[in-house]
Image (cartoon, grey):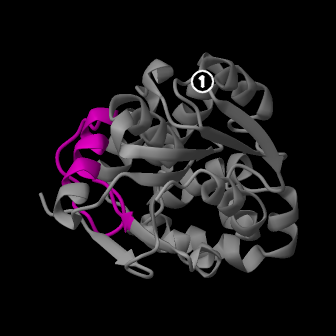
């Protein structure tokens, strides 16, 4: 399977892997790129995302890790810093746990290692909404869980833009992405790299109290609350300059 990936930044920059949110493509990181000028950045669309194909379902975390491994081999990518948001944060936790020798440090934002019963109920409403009313209905059901009050109030055009793109995924891709998410169960005990957990202070999908429970399971980790909702890093890309880049820089070893 051909996986869409892209590399940018100076050849001698610190290696950084970015992992997309569930329905996002690698272009979702574009607002963050000006904050990452000192990094060699690898982005990719996993199966079901962006410009990569949506093969027959079901999808699993192991499948998404296989897509990642394929990209790392094709790009000849070295051990790397990793930043993931939402679904990408969960995949980042799995990558750091199962391939600890490949991860220098990990930033996992607005995510979980295993869905709680409450989170499963939330995500299942998205799946049911898509089956009943299609992509726009799914988007309308999901939006209050994803964005902060401030963004919805101040940038209605951005919300409308994402709603227009809701139909860019095939029904099979939506089923695969959501069913794979519902089955997510990552054992974080194998993580060796330093971990920064980030939670948007208005995140009601994976709220701070759930991320504090995750914090207890990961050695050498800390949790920082930032502005925004579940899509905190997309709402406020300056979080990269304020919080993420200093963390990565301090943990980089030549």
Residue for point 78% across, 33% down: 208
Residue ranking furthest to the front:
254
Using the rendered image of the protein, determine whether residue 146 is visible from the camera's viewpoint. Answer: yes
Q: Residue 30: name its quadrant.
A: bottom right
Q: Answer with the quarter of the image where residue 8 lies.
A: bottom left
Q: Secondary structure at mark 1?
A: loop
Q: Identify which residue, 30 or 15, lies in the foreground.
A: 15
- Coordinates of residue 56 in the picture (x, y in percent): 17, 45
Q: Would residue 185 be visible to someone looking at this image? A: no
Depth order, front residue of 156/217: 217
Identify the residue at image location x=57%, y=80%: 37
Residue 229: say if magenta.
no
**Which residue was labeled with disc 1?**
218
Which residue is more in the foreground, 193 or 72? Answer: 193
Return the x and y of residue 77 as percentages of the image width and height: 28, 61
| Magenta region includes residue 50 | yes
Residue 162 location, x and y as percent? 58, 70
In the displayed structure, does residue 65 sit left or right of residue 206? left
Q: Residue 142, relative to residue 213: is it above or below?
A: below
In the displayed structure, 205 sits above or below 67; it is above
Magenta segment range? 43-70
Q: Quadrant of the N terminus?
A: bottom left
Count of residue discs: 1
């Amino acid at each position: 399977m051909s996986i869409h990936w892209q590399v940018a930044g100076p050849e001698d920059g610190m290696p950084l892997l970015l992992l997309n949110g569930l329905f996002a493509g690698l272009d979702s990181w574009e607002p963050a790129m000006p904050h990452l000028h000192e990094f060699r950045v690898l982005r990719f669309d996993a199966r079901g995302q962006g410009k990569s194909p949506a093969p027959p379902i079901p999808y699993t975390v192991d499948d998404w890790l296989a897509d990642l491994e394929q990209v790392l081999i094709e790009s000849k990518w070295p051990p790397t810093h990793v930043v993931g948001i939402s679904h990408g944060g969960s995949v980042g936790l799995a990558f750091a746990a199962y391939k600890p020798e490949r991860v220098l440090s990990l930033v996992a934002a607005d995510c979980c290692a295993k869905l709680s019963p409450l989170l499963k109920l939330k995500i299942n409403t998205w799946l049911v909404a898509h089956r009943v009313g299609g992509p726009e209905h799914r988007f309308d059901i999901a939006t209050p869980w994803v964005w902060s009050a401030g963004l919805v109030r101040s940038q209605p055009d951005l919300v409308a833009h994402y709603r227009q793109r809701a139909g860019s995924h095939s029904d099979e891709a939506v089923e695969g992405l959501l069913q794979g998410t519902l089955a997510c169960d990552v054992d974080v005990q194998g993580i060796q790299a330093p971990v920064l957990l980030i939670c948007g202070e208005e995140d009601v999908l994976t709220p701070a109290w759930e991320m504090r429970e995750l914090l207890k399971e990961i050695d050498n980790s800390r949790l920082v609350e930032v502005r925004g909702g579940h899509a905190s890093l997309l709402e406020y890309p300056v979080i990269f300059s304020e919080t993420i880049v200093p963390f990565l820089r301090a943990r980089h070893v030549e």
